[in-house]
Amino acid sequence: MKPTNWIDTILNERVRPKVAALKFVSQTFSKYVMVGILNTAIHWLSFLILFEFLATQSTSNFVAFLIAVTFSFFINSKFTFKSKRSFGRYVSFITFMSMVSFLTGYMADKMALPIILTLVIFSSLSLVCGYYYSKFFVFTEAPT
């Protein structure tokens, strides 16, 4: 066996599939971040308006989240994951992300956190948790 053959074998069988998987994750995560920026703007604006009327961070964050998560679900299913949408997937996504949203607001109320800190914490948590939950539980089939 020539030296280049075993090197090619290792590259073809071990390295290239991992690089391709990383590239896919990188591309989907980049798209998810772009949608997340729009989603965050929708969420923050809704939160600030609602907080003026509802007076608690937990409720304001939760309702603002429902507005933003609906946008996020539909755009990410089509643009980021190229996956079919269904009511079941929507309910799964909203349920998981609602728990993250409400718990963030609940803890913020208990700790009397400043509103801006609540928004930053939730935006960070929802970006990471939302991406992995979407990728591994909601939009699991191969891209269409």
Image (cartoon, rainbow, N blue to C red):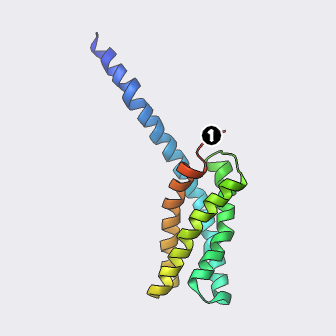
Residue at 60% x, 75% y is: 44
Q: Which residue position holds label 1?
A: 143
Q: Quadrant of the N terminus?
A: top left
Q: Amino acid at mark 1?
A: Pro
Residue 33 position (above or below residue 139): below
Expressed as whole percent of the image width and height from the top left, the position of residue 51 reads 63, 85
Q: Nearer the viewer, residue 88 or 32?
A: 88
Task: Relative to 143, say whether 73 is above or below.
Answer: below
Q: Residue furthest top?
A: 1
Q: Position of residue 2 (x, y in %)?
A: 28, 11
* Horizontal side, residue 80 vs residue 10: left or right: right
* Nearer to us in this view, 69 or 90: 90
Indicate the position of residue 68 as horizontal and vertical percent values. Answer: 65, 67
Q: How many other residues sit within 10 Å of disc 1, few (<14), some (14-19) or many (≥20)?
A: few
Q: Element under label 1?
A: loop
Residue in view at x 57 percent, y 81 percent: 58
Is residue 20 placed above or below 91 in the rendered structure?
A: above
Total of numbered circles in the picture? 1
Nearer to us in this view, 48 or 13? 13
Q: Quadrant of the C terminus?
A: top right
x and y percentages locating residue 36 in the rendered image: 58, 61
Query: What's the residue at 53%, 45% (across, down)?
Result: 27
Q: Is residue 80 above or below residue 64?
A: above
Q: Can you tell which quarter of the image residue 33 is in?
A: bottom right
